[in-house]
Amino acid sequence: MLPEGNPRFCIECGHRLSDVVQPEAVPQPAAGGQVTVRLPNARVEQSVIGGTIKLPSSGAIPPGMWVLDEPPGPQTVVAIYAPLRAVVGGWSGLSGHGWRRGDRSALRDSRMAYTFTAERVWFPAPGCGGGIRLHITIAAIAESAEGRSRLGFRYRERDDPPMQVIHAEWRNQDGEPVQHPIPEIQIMAPPRIPRVSDLREVIRRMRADEARRWLTGSATQGTYRLLGGDVQQRTPAGRGLVLVEVEETARQGWLQRLFALTPNHYRARIEQPLTVAFDQWRHQVNQMKQEAASLGLDMETDVVVEWWLDRYNYDGVIFTNARQRYQYDRVVVVFRRSQLVQVRR
């Protein structure tokens, strides 16, 4: 049974907006090396069908985290991730990328409304929950201007998402329907990890002695050049800035040095880097995808990589034997401009 009256709930605490309560504190990221599951979404009150919009501190259970023998009942709130892509200032859903375009209907002024649906599965931890899974259908509606069609939808971070649960049923391992009460269902956006373009940061300038003191505790103590400048790049480790050591660029031929993209020298502060040989990266990414799938995170590779690195508190990646991709043996990727300082010369 879905709640009557299309109730609205607070994004912070999950209580009805008519209730006057203090919102629960948002859990902070785990300390170094520990695993944490985050369920970020738009921080506004939401129009909800099929459940409440609550953060994990309010009791929502994401896929793979239910550890009881019995499956969730009607008093439980389960969380599912909608197949959304992060775009500047918001989220988008695209046909062919987790969404299927369905019916369309005419609106006033010759506009059209397109319906997009996505199938999600909530599942308990292995060996728990009676071995049944909750199959859920989400629908989203997007309007188009006269004479135009839609391949998807988008919404801003602080807007009410145009999504709702339209069907849910329990099924066993053979895909057969199972009669069991439906829990409340919470639609969540996938994890959105802040990287270079999401943050209003600049690369500071320091004297050489200041930069040396600033590097105390950093695993990277070298002097670097930026490849591609300080503009965010798409790297194997997700969005970031790419650096190579000055000593290595000095060994390149005179023609390569002549056309270097930037002559500036930088120091990089990375306290917990992931160091991996470049030819082993594909294997590492496959492990990341398996871990994401175990938590119901069906996301594109770049997003999975960013999520996994953030989950284990890595603040940079050091690729070794990377000459095949970058023409340099050792390449460093940082995720924020604040991790760099430019050395005054």
Image: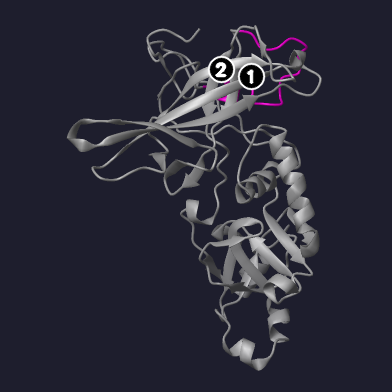
Q: Tag 1, which secondary structure?
A: strand
User: At 66% from the left edge and 59% from the top edge, which residue is drawn?
Assistant: 236
User: At 25% from the left edge and 45% from the top edge, which residue is drawn?
Assistant: 147
Q: Is residue 103 above or below residue 260?
A: above
- Magenta: main secondary structure equals loop
Residue 168 tag number: 2
Instruction: Let me know if residue 7 appears in the view.
Output: yes
Percent coordinates x, y for residue 307 in the rendering: 64, 44
**What range of the chain is rendered magenta?**
54-73
Residue 134 tag number: 1
Q: Are marks 2 and 1 in contact (CB under 8 Å)?
A: yes
Q: Is residue 297 above or below residue 339?
A: above
- Quarter residue 144 falls in: top left
- Which image quadrant: the C terminus? bottom right
Instruction: Let me know if residue 161 appears in the view.
Output: no
Q: Residues within 10 Å of mark 1 (few under 14, many from 20)?
A: many
